[in-house]
Image (cartoon, rainbow, N blue to C red):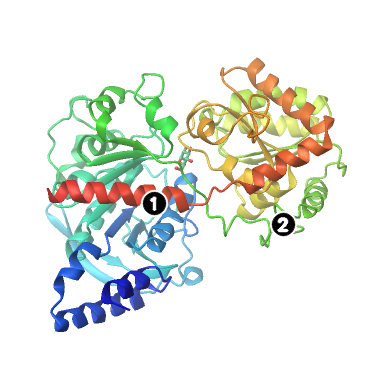
Amino acid sequence: MNARVLYISQRHQRVSVAAQRGRRARFLRTLDNLRVPSLIAPKAQLRVAFAAAEAAPFAKVGGLADVAGSLPQALARLGCEVTLYVPLHGTIDRAKSGIPAAGAERSVSYGASHVRVAYPSIERDGVRVVFVANKRVGRDKVYGAPDDAKRYAFFCRSVAAAIEDEPADIVHAHDWHAALLVPMIGRRVATIFTIHNLAYQGKTSAEILAPVGLVKTRISVEKPGECNPMARAIARADIVSTVSPGYAKEILTPEFGEGLEGLLQQRKADVRGIVNGIDTEFFDPATDPHIAANYSAEDRRGKAQCKAALQTEGGLRVDAETPVLGVIGRLVEQKGIDLLTAVAPDLLEGGAQLVVLGSGDPAYEERWRKLRERYPSRLFLTLGFDAALAQRIYAGCDLFLMPSRFEPCGLGQLISLRYGTIPVVRAVGGLADTVRDVDEDPRAGNGFSFRQYDRAAFSGALARALRAFRRDGDLWNELRGRAMHEDHSWTASAKQYLDMYRLAHKRHRE
Ligand code: GLC
């Protein structure tokens, strides 16, 4: 085996980062001794520093955690050397996650003072996960502290300091919490900024900038005295990406641009959309330990047992013929909670059963509690979050509802497809990119969708879905099989990220 082939084959092995690094170092030394350094440069692994506020399984509030918890692994499988930086939140169970008590320590400047920050790290599936440990960063909630803006600015400052010591070729920051990392890195390293949700920009006072070493100079969209972290990252990153091609187009318009459409238009040539994947090993009905019976695309018999178990668990009538509709997610306007609340009584009166898991707007939570009082044997409501229950819902339902007002990507529809639960979605953003209406496209459709954001349009799509469920067992079965056979793993999307990294890296070197 020649050296290059040996090196490439090494890159494809899923070995621990440390082992990989050790081996790579030994290999490079060997090459040095052989005096063939020209082989090294073009094939060197890209070192990616990935920064996000949350990452599954350590801390999870929304879809960002799923992405930060699975895309790095997919990139590592493609040969990248990924370091994921996340805050050591107070809720992270150190013992359970195997996070060592001590780690590398650095002194990070903050205003006139110097703050000691620890960086305990672990390895997970070929990715080094570095936790930024300091009481300014780690709190009992991922979001919602009164000083979140300062807190996340300091998180970025700490990550930037770590990157000085452990250089990267690509710095990949996610959402507003990690956004200030982009101007902190400046032109030193190629930067990618990914928007998971443009509605949260982290707008705050410009006072937070000086202590973390950033200039106050306003960018066009900021008001005097204001700092908009997300806008600053959009303005400065080498490439701006978002989590579906559809949303990448939508955010250039006033309807979805959240006031940043002008800035995004200016950067249009550098705006990309790459659809999210899901962790298909974790979300796999064939092996999922949380569901009543395992099943697969080829043998779907277990799904009926999952449905009966869910009905029993929720105190619903156990009946295979009754359609069970699932909702999982934040009960907020973005997710179309107003439409869901409006159609719920009709659905329940019409004989359907509803299973809802999530928390959000207190006014809507209250309305759903009232609905439960009225329909105790038809509505299984859980206000809060429970990952294992979520999996039982994906497995046990017939239909999965996502009538979102806007949706950068959406993961629920991808997970439900994998579990053979047919999505009913509004055709917007990533939902429009991943769900094809079966009435419009009988041979390739995988769900039901509607366009206009109103109750009548949503009810129309639901009526079509329920008719299909009740009418023809064979067709429904075929639809289920098709949904389950689709590939929503990271494989294709991670390759697109890698291409984007290579492009940013190349441009940066030029
Ligand atoms: C945000 C978006 C959601 C997306 C997720 C992961 O939560 O609202 O659409 O799937 O980020 O990118």
Q: Amino acid at mark 1?
A: Lys
Residue at point 25%, 39% (across, down): 233
Residue at point 26%, 52% (across, down): 171
**Helix, strand or loop at disc 2?**
loop
Q: Amino acid at mark 2?
A: Ile
**What is the crowding at mark 2: few (fewer than 14 residues within 10 Å), some, or many (at least 20)?**
many
Q: For residue 143, which quarter of the picture?
A: top left
From this viewpoint, is residue 439 visible? Answer: yes
Which of the numbered marks, if any, corresponds to residue 221?
A: none
Which of the numbered marks, if any, corresponds to residue 495?
A: 1
User: In this rendering, would 408 be left or right of 351?
Assistant: left
In the rendered picture of this protein, how many numbered marks are placed on residues? 2
**Helix, strand or loop at disc 1?**
helix
The reply to whether the C-beta atoms of the residues labelled 2 and 1 are less than 8 Å apart is no
**Is ligand 1 within 8 Å of the beta carbon of the residue shown at mark 1?**
no
Q: Nearer the viewer, residue 1 or 309?
A: 1
Q: Position of residue 436 (x, y in %)?
A: 59, 31
As drawn, 459 above or below 190: above
User: In this rendering, would 481 be left or right of 183?
Assistant: right
As drawn, 157 above or below 326: below
Identify the residue under disc 2.
291
Q: Residue furthest front?
A: 1
* Mark-to-mark CA distance, 2 and 1: 32 Å
Q: Position of residue 467 (x, y in %)?
A: 79, 26
User: In this rendering, would 351 be left or right of 83?
Assistant: right
Q: Position of residue 118 (x, y in %)?
A: 28, 67
